[in-house]
Amino acid sequence: MKEQARFWRHPAVPDVDLLKARYVTHRFTRHAHAEFAIGLILEGVEEFDHGGSLRRAGAGEIVLVNPEVAHTGHPGTPGGWAYRMLYPSLETMAEIAADLGRPRGTPSFPEQVVRDPALAALLDRAHRAAERGDDLAASTLTRTLFGGLLARHGVPRPVTGPGAELTSAGRRAVQEAIELLGASLLDPPTLDRVAESVRARPFPLLRAFKAETGLPPHAYLVSLRVRRARRLLASGRTPAEVAAEVGFTDQAHLTRHFKRIVGVPPAAYQRAAGTYKT
């Protein structure tokens, strides 16, 4: 079976991206999104590590990946898997949660694989409406979907998980380290320099960083570079220009990491954004 993937911006709901794909051998490297990843498995099985635990999602099941949680993605059967994904921003989901009168706090999904036939059917309808450009139906169904997921499967995010034991000082150090990396895409500092800048020791900072983000600093840097690359590609910059601006060695280096995180190569991403130049 041939691998196919299409990535595009939702035509009627701001800050939502969409992916329709079939993957047979493709493997997503461990990474973290700034946004949620919500999808329906259409065929086959996807396996993914989410926050250190392996999940398995089969046909008809909904996948719910929280923002800033390190995860992977790979075939769970020889035939791979096919799915439809939506990537709403944290702000979009927080606004919908507030409109629903949900308890205050950042929305989160405690279960990463759920079987909910009604919402699965709604997700499929919403995604197909966005694919065919039916803006009214797509916007109505998509917002109804997000509201239903938050009401039936969402909770305010508690301070639990791998980084729950971190002190406020530890979290501060990690956040400052992330900001430093984001400002140093072209010439990232050594771990020792990062630790010195955030007033921490290198090894404790490394442990705290991995506990909080699920990734070591060098891997998190790749995610930051890809996030920046997405914005630049959507603005019309060429892949070669983007590679140089975000710190990848060359266009091939950008393409390899971009596809392993986003699921499509930069040129396909630009075609979806309408900024591809021949």
Image (spheres, rainbow, N blue to C red):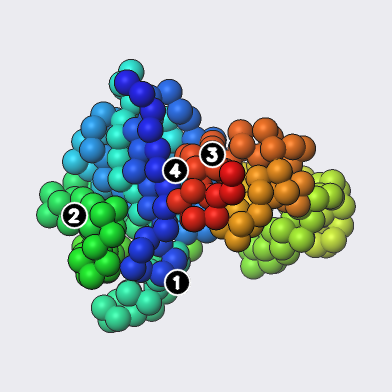
> Dividing the picture into quarters, in which one does residue 218 lie?
top right
User: How far across and how far down the image is residue 167, in percent?
Assistant: 64, 63
Residue 59: assigned label:
none
Dot 1 falls on a residue whose secondary structure is helix
Task: Compare residues 15 and 181 and report the one nearer the observer.
Answer: 15
Q: Residue at x 55, y 49 (%)?
A: 276
Dot 3 falls on a residue whose secondary structure is loop
Quadrant assignment for the C terminus: top right
Q: Residue at x 66, y 54 (%)?
A: 237
**Among the two numbered marks 1 and 3 on one chain, the one whose residue lies closer to the N terminus:** 1
Q: Give the crowd class for mark 1: few <14, some 14-19, many >=20 residues within 10 Å.
A: few
Q: Give the crowd class for mark 2: few <14, some 14-19, many >=20 residues within 10 Å.
A: some
**Among the two numbered marks 1 and 4 on one chain, the one whose residue lies closer to the N terminus:** 4
What residue is shown with label 1? 91
What residue is shown with label 2? 125
Q: Give the crowd class for mark 3: few <14, some 14-19, many >=20 residues within 10 Å.
A: many
Dot 4 falls on a residue whose secondary structure is strand
Q: Residue at x 42, y 47 (%)?
A: 7
What residue is shown with label 3? 265
Depicted 262 relative to depicted 177: above or below: above
What residue is shown with label 4? 50
Q: Nearer the viewer, mark 1 or mark 4?
A: 1
Residue 13 is left or right of residue 61, and the answer is right
> Dividing the picture into quarters, in which one does residue 44 lie?
top left
Asked if the residues shown at circle 4 and circle 2 are in contact, with their CB atoms under 8 angstroms apart, the answer is no
